[in-house]
Amino acid sequence: MKFADFVCFEAAIPELQTTDRDGAIAELVSSLDEAGRLKRGKRKDIIKAVIERENEASTGMGKGVAVPHVKHSAVKDIVAAVGLSGSGIDFSALDKQPVYSVILLLSPVDSPDRHLQAMENIFRQLQQEKFRKFLRQCHTPEQIEDLLKEVDENPSLG
Amino acid sequence: MDKVVCEAAVEIRNADGLHMRPAMQFVDVANQFDCDVTVSNAENIVDGKSIMQMSMLAATCGTKLNIKTEGTDAEEAINALRELVEDKHFDEPTPGDQEKR
């Protein structure tokens, strides 16, 4: 699966307003809601579900990235939103370091295989130092879209 | 001490596959041992002690993986990992469980 298959580029937030984990999750879920990617009136339920999942175990995998996610019945189709923070967010990451790049992934409950394929793509890129660096350097939604589409076409660029 | 090398072919049996929570359980168990742990599917070989790399396997229910351990405690490690995947299936439901309900 490619980024373009599941990332909602118009929901990208190049500079998150909040500096705390729950605030960042709320901003990204709201952005997806405003882009029409969630069922109506379910924004709060989804924010709560993502935070609950995050409380079970941090998705801050280290190296400044976090991938909060949840499977939820109010999600129409698998969708992700990218958020960046210049100042860094405390995600209780495995390496205890702040998180600068957040990729929020929401999946419907009935397609676990597509969820795994999206995760595979996300981590394949996040593993690469160059990709993490380029992502942090994005300042506009267009730059984020260009970067993700570029690594879709040429995965080794990341 | 001699270096021990063990290999086991396992199948992912929980319905949701190797998503992040099971992958973390796997990494936690792997890190209890000193030996190197690698996991491979048809395309990739990854470090079984790295959550990022394990998440790259995208192992859905029914996927067959090969676990390889190398080091003095390789045998204990492979037994613990095989038990987690195939006997406990990460304490998650399998498709068979769902049919019974």
Image (tube, coloured by chain):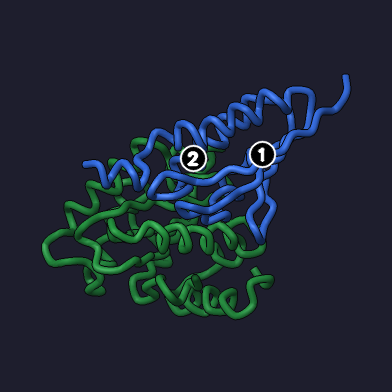
Residue matched to label 1: B8
Q: Which part of the image, by quadrant, shows the C terminus of chain A? A: bottom right
User: Which residue is at a point 26% across and 47% down the rendered structure image?
Assistant: B99
Chain letter for mark 1, please.
Answer: B
Residue matched to label 2: A93
User: Which residue is at a point 71% across and 40% down the rendered structure image?
Assistant: B68
Determine whether, in the image, residue B7 is placed left or right of residue A18.
Answer: right
Q: Quadrant of residue A62?
A: top right
Q: Label 1 crowding class (10 Å Cα cut-off): few <14, some 14-19, many 20+?
A: some
Chain painted in blue in the figure: B
The reply to whether residue A74 is visible in this rendering is: yes
**Inter-mark Cα distance, 2 to 1:** 32 Å
Determine whether, in the image, residue A83 is placed left or right of residue B71.
Answer: left
Q: Label 2 crowding class (10 Å Cα cut-off): few <14, some 14-19, many 20+?
A: many
- Against A32, residue B27 (above or below) is above
Q: Quadrant of residue A15?
A: bottom left
Q: Colour of chain A?
A: green
